[in-house]
Image: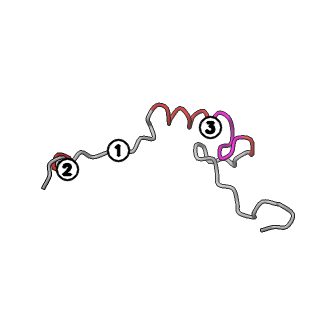
């Protein structure tokens, strides 16, 4: 760890929405606009993980 409290020399990751460098106030985003775009994607379900239906789900309820 740096003795002076400085952050590590690791480069900052780009904004996940537009790819620009992030700003401290909106990290990890580059602006409030990109933060709002990301929030809208979460709230609208764009980031949902798709699920596959299988026949095994019916078998789980029945004892073997």
Q: Is residue 32 left or right of residue 58?
A: right
**Which image quarter: residue 13?**
bottom right
| In this view, 56 is above or below 8 | above
Residue 15 position within the rendered picture, expressed as x and y whole percent measured from the top left: 63, 47
| Foreground pick, 2 / 30 | 2
Question: Label 1: which residue?
Answer: 50
**Taking 59 as reference, is 45 left or right?**
right
Residue assigned mark 3: 34
Q: Which residue is mark 2?
A: 60
Q: What residue do we see at 44% from left, 37% from top?
A: 46
**Label 1: how many Cα within 10 Å (few below 14, some 14–19, many 20+):** few
Point out residue 57 in the picture as x, y percentages from the top left corner. Answer: 21, 47
Position of 45 with respect to 11 (left or right) is left
Residue nearer the viewer, 18 or 32: 32
- What segment carries the magenta color? 26-34
Q: Which sits earlier in the primary sequence, circle 1 or circle 3?
A: 3
Mark 1 or mark 2: name the one nearer the start of the chain: 1
């Amino acid at each position: 760890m740096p003795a002076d409290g400085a952050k590590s020399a690791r480069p900052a990751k780009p904004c996940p929405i537009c790819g620009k460098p992030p700003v401290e106030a909106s990290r990890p985003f580059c602006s409030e606009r990109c933060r709002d775009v990301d929030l809208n994607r979460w709230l609208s379900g764009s980031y949902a993980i798709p699920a596959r239906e299988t026949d095994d789900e019916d078998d789980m309820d029945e004892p073997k």
